[in-house]
Image (tube, helix red, strand yellow):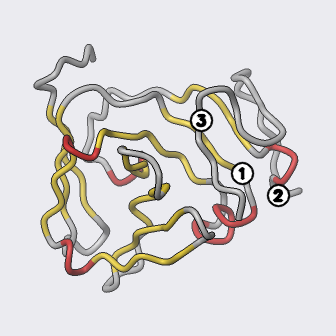
Amino acid sequence: MTDSDDTLRTGRCNCGAVRFTTRGPLRAVVACHCSQCRRQTGLHYAATNVADGRLTVEGADAVTWYRASQEAGRGFCRHCGSALFWKHDREDYTSVLAGSFDQPTGLAMAEHIFCDDKADFYEITDGLPQYARGSPGIVVADG
């Protein structure tokens, strides 16, 4: 799928209380293997991101924001617990979990970050770049 400024994608939490629409291009998917992401999702956090002005959230009152660090928060549905968003305080975009999008997404995985912190029960074998911590151009929190 080729993105343009008017490409629309939709998604939602598991129970449907939170629905969202993105408009325009999205970053390729990045898998984060840090301990916070592992504990929140059970494996890793696979997310893209979208400019804040290109994200519309219906049911935003059902999103609970957990302060994961002094610099960032994680948004999840307070009804079903679905992890949906990650937001750095100083950035003008929001990361959206790739699995929460309706199919087809047209998204592709690009790289893995925080690989030094990944769980010991799996290997990363897809041949994509792996970084010990963050990667060039990816903003992470220090928390």
Kind of residue indicated by mark 2: Ala
Q: Name the residue tied to disc 2.
A: 119
Kind of residue indicated by mark 3: Ile
Give how far across and how far down residue 26 sits, in percent.
34, 30
Tell whether label 1 touches label 2 (CB within 8 Å): yes
Residue at 15% x, 27% y is 7
Question: Left of 19 or right of it: where is 101?
Answer: right
Residue at 31% x, 69% y is 14
Report the quarter where the C terminus lies.
bottom right
* Closer mark to the observer between disc 3 and disc 1: 3
Q: Secondary structure at mark 1?
A: loop
Q: Residues within 10 Å of mark 1 (few under 14, many from 20)?
A: many
* Closer mark to the observer between disc 3 and disc 2: 3
Kind of residue indicated by mark 1: His
Q: Image quadrant of residue 35?
A: bottom right
Q: Which mark is residue 138?
A: 3
Please tell me how many numbered marks the rendered image carries: 3
Residue at 78% x, 33% y is 131
Could you give the CA–CA distance between mark 3 and mark 2, rounded to whole angstroms?
Answer: 21 Å
Q: Name the residue tied to disc 1.
A: 33
Residue at 84% x, 39% y is 132
| Depth order, front residue of 13/140 | 140
Could you give the CA–CA distance between mark 2 and mark 1, rounded to whole angstroms?
Answer: 8 Å
| Depth order, front residue of 78/125 | 78
The numbered mark, 3 or 2, whose residue comes first in the sequence reads 2
